[in-house]
Amino acid sequence: MSAQELEPILNQVRRLSQEDQLLLIKRLVQIVGEARTATEQRNLIYGKYSNGTGGRMSSEKDFDVAEWRPSEKDLNGL
């Protein structure tokens, strides 16, 4: 939604009583909270995708070691 599309909605909100504006805010927070919960439910679950061989699971340290940390030369060729 663009800012131009939002302006008529904001004008309507300004005409609401303070009590109705607070109710609107409460409902918006509820909607955003529901969206956040849905997003959190899509996160990967630790160990869910193991290959079942019983090998050691990767740790945070493994990921830290594997992370690429480019030097100035890598980035700029200097």
Image (cartoon, helix red, strand yellow):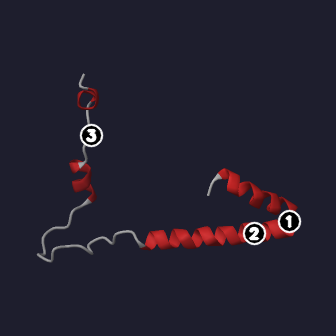
Image coordinates for residue 37, horizontal then vertical, percent: 51, 72
Left or right: residue 65 versus residue 16 is left
Image coordinates for residue 59, horizontal then vertical, percent: 24, 61
Between 58 and 50, the one lying in front of the other is 50
Q: Quadrant of the C terminus?
A: top left
Judged from this view, the residue extending furthest toward the top is 78
Type of amino acid under label 1:
Leu
Specify few, some or many for label 2: CA neighbours under 10 Å numbering under 14, 14-19, or 20 or more: some
The first of marks 3 and 1 along the sequence is 1
SS at badge 3: loop
Specify few, some or many for label 1: CA neighbours under 10 Å numbering under 14, 14-19, or 20 or more: few
Q: Which residue is mark 3?
A: 69
* Above or below: residue 65 compared with residue 15: above
CA–CA distance between discs 1 and 2?
9 Å
Type of amino acid under label 3:
Arg
2 vs 3, front mark: 2
Type of amino acid under label 2:
Leu
Q: Residue at x 30, y 70 (%)?
A: 46
Whether tag 2 and tag 3 are in contact, CB under 8 A, the answer is: no
Specify few, some or many for label 3: CA neighbours under 10 Å numbering under 14, 14-19, or 20 or more: few
Image coordinates for residue 15, horizontal then vertical, percent: 87, 62
CA–CA distance between discs 3 and 1?
53 Å
The first of marks 2 and 3 along the sequence is 2
Q: Which residue is mark 1?
A: 16
3 vs 1, front mark: 1
SS at badge 2: helix
Q: Which residue is mark 2?
A: 24
Whether tag 1 and tag 2 are in contact, CB under 8 A, the answer is: yes
The first of marks 1 and 2 along the sequence is 1
